[in-house]
Amino acid sequence: MTILYLTLILAAIYPFLLFWDHRTARNPETGEYKAQRISDSFALFAPFALLYYHEAFWHNLIFYFIPLYVYFLLLAWVVQKKFKLASVFDMLCSLSIGSFMLVIIGYYIFFHQGVLAPEEEVVKVVEQRQMGMWIWWPIAAAILTVVSGIVLLKVIGEKAEKLLFYVAFILLILPFFSHHPYWAMLLSTGLFFNFCLFAAKHGGSTGAGAYSALFFFYLMAQMMALIVYAIFF
């Protein structure tokens, strides 16, 4: 199926989904409105079809899917104003922005050669020169960092709480040197999550909420690191 036929089918489906949501939005027994709508889920997942047509990703995004979502927004605005389907336009705006961002990140991760990536022949030469388990050293270093931090927290206690920032920084940097960066990022996130759990139980006077906040900021930093690696490498 070509991208043109796909967008025409999506354009034809969306009004029916809005009509369905309008008919079923209110519970006749309680008078309350549903928190979830099928049109919202449709708007969230539809842009991921662009990854199937990744050979002309930017062309399809600009000339097919952006006009398609402008059409969606117009319909959503009419339904919200004229038919009183609450916040459908606002929800579509927020979902579509986030969804397109995820699709673009996915394109850079899976289908785009990074700006700073070496030529393919150079990559093959480098891969041939890599020896044994040496390519796994960043992952081993991440595990060693967390184990060392746990040992220091046990021995030093409250005075070692500042170590969390150093551990977080090291875990964010190491995947950039890994032969499997995305798996290394996932492993680093899991390691830091368990490190925060251990610190919350065995650390000093800092409350568990502080460690939860630190892990949240770590996730934000990890997402930025993921985007940077996907674009440049």
Image: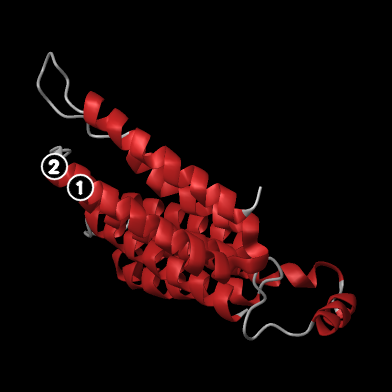
Within 10 angstroms of label 2, few (less than 14), some, or many (20 or more) residues? Answer: few
Which residue is pictured at 24% across the width and 24% down the height? Answer: 24
- Quadrant of residue 101 in the image? bottom left
Residue 61 — which label? none
| Disc 1 + disc 2, Cβ < 8 Å | yes
The crowd level at tag 1 (other Cα within 10 Å; few <14, some 14-19, many 20+) is some
Residue located 47% across and 59% down the image: 65
Task: Left or right? Give the position of 140 relative to 128.
Answer: left
The one of 160 and 25 positioned closer to us in this rendering: 25
Say which element carries label 2.
Answer: helix
Badge 1 marks a residue whose secondary structure is helix
Q: What residue type is labelled 1?
A: Val
Relative to residue 141, is residue 122 drawn left or right?
A: right
In the displayed orientation, state which residue is furthest to the top.
Answer: 29
212, above or below 173, in the image? above
Where is residue 42? Give x, y as percent: 41, 42
In the rendered view, tell whether residue 23 sits above or below residue 101. Answer: above
125 versus 64 height, above or below: below
Q: Which mark is residue 78?
A: 1
Say which amino acid is labelled 2: Lys
Q: In which quarter of the image is residue 118?
A: bottom right
Indicate which disc residue 82 carries: 2
Q: Where is residue 114 in the image (x, y as percent from the top left)?
A: 63, 79
